[in-house]
Amino acid sequence: MRIYRLSAQPARYSVVTMKTPRAFTAVLATETNTFSPIRVDIHAFKASLLARPGEHPETPTLCSAVITVGRRFAKDNGWDLVEGTAAWADPAGLVSRQTYEGLRDEILDQIETGGPFDAIVLGLHGAMVAEGYDDPEGDFLERVRDVVGAEVPIVATLDPHSHLTQRRVSMANALIAFKEFPHTDFVDRAEDAWRIARETVAGDVKPVISVFDPKMIDVFPTSTQPMRGFVDDMIRREAETPGILSLSVIHGFLAGDVPEMGTKVIAVTDNDPALGASVARDLGTALFELRGKVRSKEHSPAEALDRALEFEGAPVTIADMWDNPGGGTAGDATVLLREAIDRKLDSIAFGSIWDPVAVQLCHAAGEGATMQLRFGAKSAPNTGSPIDAEVQVIRNIRNAEQRFGDSIVPVGDASLVKLGGIEVILNSTRAQCFDTTLFTGFGIDPGQRKILVVKSTNHFYRSFALVSPLILYCSAGLAYPTDPRITPYKKAPRDIWPILDRASPEQAASAGE
């Protein structure tokens, strides 16, 4: 078994032989909406997840599944595991240079001083952008490679809503993205990462990354057709094709204005780049044929409420899909809420609206209080106007939480207020609605409401589909750049569909040269 000791060489490790493999795992992740006015500093990481060595909880948080899975893997396989810092901030705008460099260097120091290691397994998001860094993950991976040298495998998991850069591909041995959107498979993909790390250290495989660029960007919900079939076929090909270690689609991230923004297909093979290139091209070409056919139908606020009210079953779930804190927006738009207020609706619950000041006022007033309150629509234009209303404070919760699969997601101090027949959850830590537990935690039985409104693009789907006979997607306001053809990109490529409309990836590439 090969592992690596510190040395004076540029790679800093020298090869020795020991019986017990040692691995290092850490997390550095957030998703950056470069158009969002909400900046990210160390406090944003502390609000979501900032766990130093020995502090990570037993439950994972999306990108941090490599740690919790790694613990089980190390126990089952007799490896020594060293846990580094796990840092995750809920999506927002640019990360401050000081915060990114500080967390990056903290983890690099842990690798250098804690080594030697046989393998490095990292949890990244892939859409982080920091002041002065269009590609922080590429910078981070390159610095990790500089520490451990060319022989130590580096395996990383990614969120598919990310940017795949050549720099990252050249620095890692394997990159594995969540296959599902909603990302219900983040634990499975962490297990893939540790499997590939084990097989690589044992000398059973030599992972090689192949990439195909279909020259496009779109939104790919995998909970419905045709993407459901596409992902199922990708999973089948991964399982049935000898030599394929992992297949992934990088969906891309519409709100990230970076030079390598766009959709990519990743094939990780056992030292067979020709196979990887062929399979990645097949999948990428098939994906290009689905362009413009995969996005959920989007209703206006009036249309969404009309359809919900006409529907005989309940509850109807309406996704305020583009004011999604999971895409870096504030989550405080009031366009749909204003429509409901103007219609004097009842039996409708909103989860949630971000307003830390309003929450503070509600907690000060106390449960049962009736008060005048202004809340919402404070962060950005085109998100509606603040709501001024007399509200009753129904419930105040300190450090409120919701679930997302195996994860526990903080929403901070929060309050449930009621105005007329409308209930609104106000939260102080930005988080999209992942699960019905956001409502039940405040005593709201989803089955007893006619309409539930959630701020989420698609992560809510699995949980709410279990209780809701009708799910509608609503485009309300302009909190998020939804159309690449009119988004004022400064750095993003112009040769991708739909910015450039061509019949094939090759034609798009040729026309963009």
Image (cartoon, rainbow, N blue to C red):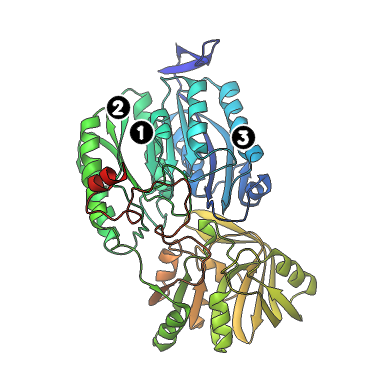
Q: CA distance from mark 2 to mark 3?
A: 34 Å
Instruction: Give the structural element (helix, strand or loop) at label 1.
Output: helix
Q: CA distance from mark 3 to mark 1?
A: 29 Å
Can you say which quadrant of the picture contains the N terminus?
top left
Residue 67 seen from this side: yes
Whichever of callouts 2 and 3 sits on the residue coming sooner in the sequence is 3
Q: Residue furthest right?
A: 364
Q: Please determine whether, in this image, residue 472 is positioned above or below residue 43.
A: below
Q: Please determine whether, in this image, residue 397 is positioned above or below residue 511.
A: below
Residue 236 seen from this side: no
Whichever of callouts 1 and 2 sits on the residue coming sooner in the sequence is 1
Q: Please determine whether, in this image, residue 335 is positioned above or below residue 86.
A: below
Question: Which circle marks residue 196 in the picture?
Answer: 1
Instruction: Give percent across and percent down for residue 85.
Output: 59, 37
State the image quarter where residue 18 is shown: top left
Image-based side of 243 in relation to 355, left or right: left
Instruction: Give the structural element (helix, strand or loop) at label 2.
Output: loop
Q: Which residue is mark 2?
A: 205
Instruction: Give the structural element (helix, strand or loop) at label 3.
Output: helix
Q: Which residue is mark 3?
A: 101
- Asked if the residues shown at circle 1 and circle 2 are in contact, with their CB atoms under 8 angstroms apart, the answer is yes
Q: Please determine whether, in this image, residue 67 is positioned above or below residue 223.
A: above
State the image quarter where residue 151 is shown: top left
- The amino acid sitting under disc 3 is Glu
- The amino acid sitting under disc 2 is Val
- The amino acid sitting under disc 1 is Ile
Q: Nearer the viewer, residue 170 or 510?
A: 510
Question: How many residues crowd mark 1 within 10 Å: few (<14), some (14–19), many (20+)?
Answer: many
Q: CA distance from mark 1 to mark 2?
A: 8 Å
The residue drawn where x is 47% and y is 78% is: 301
Can you say which quadrant of the picture contains the C terminus?
top left
